[in-house]
């Protein structure tokens, strides 16, 4: 499946708890229509004991966001400029 964004693109989150945040796409999950964005939708993952974590650990990492809730940062900035708002300003 083809999406409007790809790995490495800078995007802005348009909807949800993380609305207005920017980040680079780390991974695209085309089968689930979701993307993982650097520093966005952080979740805590409880890990079992291992050599790296002998006691086990709570690791914080990025969760996924549906691809329909993100927009390329360049397009977002162009849209904001066209509407007369300051580029990069979070809309609430």
Image (spheres, helix red, strand yellow):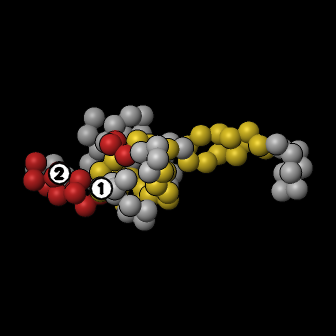
Marks 2 and 1 sit apart, C-alpha to C-alpha, by 19 Å
Nearer to the camera, 7 or 22: 7
State left or right for residue 53 relative to residue 91.
right
Residue beneath the point at 64% across and 45% down? 60
On the question of residue 64 being in view, the answer is yes
* Picture coordinates of residue 32, whole percent (x, y): 46, 43
Query: Element under label 2?
Result: helix
Task: Tell me the quarter of the image containing the C terminus.
Answer: top left
Residue 20, quarter of picture: top left
**Can you identify the residue that label 2 sits on?**
80
Residue 44, quarter of picture: top right
* Picture coordinates of residue 84, whole percent (x, y): 10, 50
* Picture coordinates of residue 9, whole percent (x, y): 37, 63
Residue beneath the point at 29% across and 51% down? 71
**Neighbour tally class for label 1: few under 14, some 14-19, many 20 plus, Cα within 10 Å:** few
Query: Element under label 1?
Result: loop
Among all residues in the image, which is located at the extreme bottom? 8
Which label's residue is closer to the chain start, 2 or 1?
Answer: 1
Numbered circle sitting on residue 56: none
**Can you identify the residue that label 1 sits on?**
4
Answer yes or no: do the residues labelled 2 and 1 have beta carbons within 8 Å?
no
The total of numbered circles placed on residues is 2
Vertical placement of 82 versus 55: above or below? Answer: below
* Picture coordinates of residue 88, whole percent (x, y): 27, 53
Residue beneath the point at 34% across and 56% down? 2
**Neighbour tally class for label 2: few under 14, some 14-19, many 20 plus, Cα within 10 Å:** some
Q: Nearer the viewer, mark 2 or mark 1?
A: 1
On the question of residue 34 being in view, the answer is no
Residue beneath the point at 77% across and 43% down? 47
């Amino acid at each position: 499946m083809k999406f409007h964004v790809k790995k490495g693109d800078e995007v802005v989150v348009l909807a949800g708890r993380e609305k207005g945040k920017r980040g680079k796409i780390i991974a695209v999950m085309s089968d689930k229509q979701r993307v993982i964005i650097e520093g966005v939708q952080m979740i805590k993952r409880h890990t079992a004991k291992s050599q790296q974590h002998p006691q086990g650990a709570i690791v914080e990492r990025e969760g996924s966001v549906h691809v329909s809730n993100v927009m390329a940062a360049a397009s977002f900035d162009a849209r904001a400029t066209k509407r007369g708002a300051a580029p990069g300003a979070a809309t609430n």
